[in-house]
Image: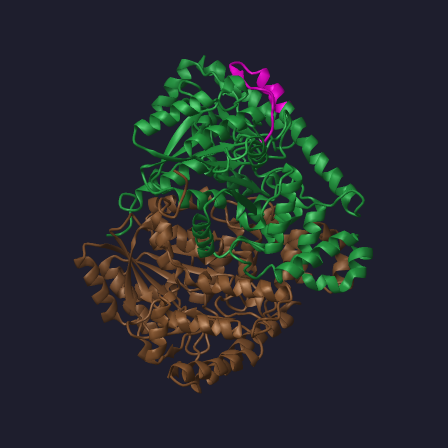
Chain colours: A brown, B green
Amino acid sequence: MRLSVDNINQRVVAAKYAVRGELAVKSEEYRAKLSKGDTGLPFSEVISANIGNPQQLDQKPITFFRQVCSLLENPQLLEKEDVLINGLGYKTDVIERAKWLLSQVGSVGAYSASKGVPAIQESIAKFLERRDGFPANPANIYLSGGASSGVNTLLNVMCTGKEAGILIPIPQYPLYTATLSVLDATPVPYLLDEAKSWGTDLETIRAAHEKAKADKLDVRCIVVINPGNPTGASLPEEDIRAVIDYAAKENLVIMADEVYQTNVFIGKFHSFKGVLRKMQQEAPGKYDGVELASLHSISKGMVGECGHRGGYFELVGFDPEVEANIYKFVSIMLCAPVIGQCLVELMVNPPKPGEPSYDLYRQEYDGIFQGLRERANALHKAFAQMEGVECGEPQGSMYLFPTIKLPAKAAEAAAAENRTADEFYCMRLLEATGICVVPGSGFGQAEGTTHFRTTFLAPGTEWVGSITKFHKEFMDKYR
Amino acid sequence: MRLSVDNINQRVVAAKYAVRGELAVKSEEYRAKLSKGDTGLPFSEVISANIGNPQQLDQKPITFFRQVCSLLENPQLLEKEDVLINGLGYKTDVIERAKWLLSQVGSVGAYSASKGVPAIQESIAKFLERRDGFPANPANIYLSGGASSGVNTLLNVMCTGKEAGILIPIPQYPLYTATLSVLDATPVPYLLDEAKSWGTDLETIRAAHEKAKADKLDVRCIVVINPGNPTGASLPEEDIRAVIDYAAKENLVIMADEVYQTNVFIGKFHSFKGVLRKMQQEAPGKYDGVELASLHSISKGMVGECGHRGGYFELVGFDPEVEANIYKFVSIMLCAPVIGQCLVELMVNPPKPGEPSYDLYRQEYDGIFQGLRERANALHKAFAQMEGVECGEPQGSMYLFPTIKLPAKAAEAAAAENRTADEFYCMRLLEATGICVVPGSGFGQAEGTTHFRTTFLAPGTEWVGSITKFHKEFMDKYR
């Protein structure tokens, strides 16, 4: 029997990944048309606001990082230090870092150890120690191809089948539900509290967990995305403490997706690892059993190197035999991209004050941060003026996730197209403006509410104006 | 319940991946000891002959490739063309290629489209057309993070569960059985014919398939590794024709793992795609239904850029709805590393005669090829002189896979350690010499036979001498 959609793996068929779904595919078709000179579209540019892809839009890479990478890719350049310094303006710390990384990796074209380059694991451990004020063990750190591949590894190891439940925030980044679908495990959704800046609510978590237990699910893990995707919210320390305390009592693994840890405009990032260690110190013995996996990435933040596919996860409190199986699982795919691993090293160990590359690094880093905040605020301001749109202040990450209240006639028109109201709205937006956003249903949302997620990465204000104009026309048409 | 080896995903626990298994872990421990100045070991260097990792050993990257990559990583360098040319010796075609690739990818730090950069898909299609003499459709080409990730994608989509059977050559590269274990699908092993230079034997395939059907398996696919891993054999065209003909009759998807297509010393590489197109031309209509996925990689060959995790697969004859699900599956992991995709482009579209970088490229490429052949021959010569060791002439890939006939006393000693005879032999070899090879049981072997796989990548002849010396002592001890 030839392969068909009816006889292939139905767990793959059932998986949904709206970030690159129908709308994204259509937007790429528009982009291709435009690049072939098509003038029949009502817009002249496609804006991919569906995906956190900073360098596709305006964000420039950090000079220090890329200078080091250029030397890692072509070590022959190190034989011409005078040209590098006098002809190309490379600083001495660029050259030193490249030499050191090469001494550790050999060649970026060689496989590293399965868990990553040992010296890079050590650099990450030192970063975690500086960040949290508590030591980290390099042996528990696993380099990965972006955080996505780390999530995939951990869910593969934890999920035994349909009976395995994983607590997932709603709204969530759909990597989680898509991966659980492929693994035939069961997502146990818990709603974030939009009224409280999308924080976690322990009673909601408990209720979801109790219901899952009553449904005979073996709930193994709670996923927390902090700062949130798509919400941008940074959890207050008390929310994190409550989750850790609950996980300890209920023997839930905590998976802390912390890839937006530097994209914080309001509040402060508290790492699960740091809070856990504090709680362990305050109440000796009580939290020793907690199993925590926390993930980070070079894709987001001011680094924005998602095309390089770099990241890591740190395990705390895992059984060594379980870790041995995680090792085996990652070793089957050999290793994370080595140049991506080197970018992780650069991210966690950037130039320090007084070092030759520091001033430029600082200036670039701060410039990106300010630029993101300004764009977020401009977009937020536009949303505030749109009829039926509500959006909390931009808190962080790379996204806004406004609620939109659509007229009943829009919902009817959507149903006639076999779409949800938010899909219908986003499709019309794309067709009218070339702006691609993701319907809230792609992340999950409370019943009866409608959202969409947009990045605030695109430069300029023209596209924001297009959204405002489209929205007014849409509302006029369906009011 | 905390995670333990008893309650995590038992499909992961059951997976075996000997290439980076116990021996590899032990060899890394030795390496760490040596680097800390330990002088208590009977060797001064660890030789990782367990894994095809060319640049970890002696193989230098191709200059043209890495020069281009250095510019992709730091596009600011393109503002100083005179320094690049006069100060660093970059040729104009290096600069042109980098500019062109950057015009296509934007930034190597940005996500590409899920299937890869469209211009790189087109470059690959042109390469396939030159290689095979038949057109290729860029839309059917998927960039992947090495071939491993392509195999993982395809098996995920094809495997529905235990009832799904996949025909796997024995010996095989253990990625296949490990992935099938994780997916809870059933490998259907078919033995390669050692007496016929490890070719495929259709009657053996048919018998394995018939038995699987009798066992109620839904056999969906036949995997062929050509040139072979671990065997190095290049299949003659008639073997490939027989497999295609059989697959057509039996509606089996063909997965052709062709990552060693340029590592051929004896015979000639025939691509499945090229042979299929010829058969389709010769017998119109008869082979139209054949579904073929063929994979290639930047990790092997004279490129050897495995640390960059680049590769692709081409689909022929797949149902568009099935392809849509493959698209969705790869999009969940976003995209293959973009610098790795660029290296794929460079591999399939290297400098041409007359272009400024051509002479050096040719010289480096041929030098690597000759070096591999010489090392393979030296190792083969040593094996020929070892008691109880038989090894066919080196045919290709990066490996030799000799048979060893071990004395009964060795088998007894192995059993006392709860190891197979080949594991026992390889462990003693590692302990005595620091040379890490992989026991034949890690790949599968005919019952009653014993093999090991060694790469011939390590430079020099000293390590070959160490194997010879060890082997003599081992045989003397257990004879």
* Farthest residue, direction top: B479
Region in magenta: B378-398
Q: Whole-percent x and y of residue B253?
A: 45, 37
Q: Position of residue A128 (x, y in %)?
A: 45, 62
Q: Residue furthest front?
A: B284
Give the quadrant of the C terminus of chain B.
Answer: top left
What is the quadrant of residue A54 in the picture? bottom right
Q: Position of residue A462 (x, y in %)?
A: 57, 80
In-front residue for pair A102/A34: A34
Residue at the (62%, 52%) spot, across then down: B120
In the image, taking residue B329 as reference, residue A187 lies left or right, namely: left
Q: Position of residue B453 (x, y in %)?
A: 51, 28
Q: Nearer the viewer, residue A186 or A331?
A: A186
Using the image, determine if residue A58 lies above or below residue B81: below
Q: Is residue B450 visible?
A: no
The reply to whether the magenta stretch includes residue B386 is yes
Observer able to see residue B33: yes
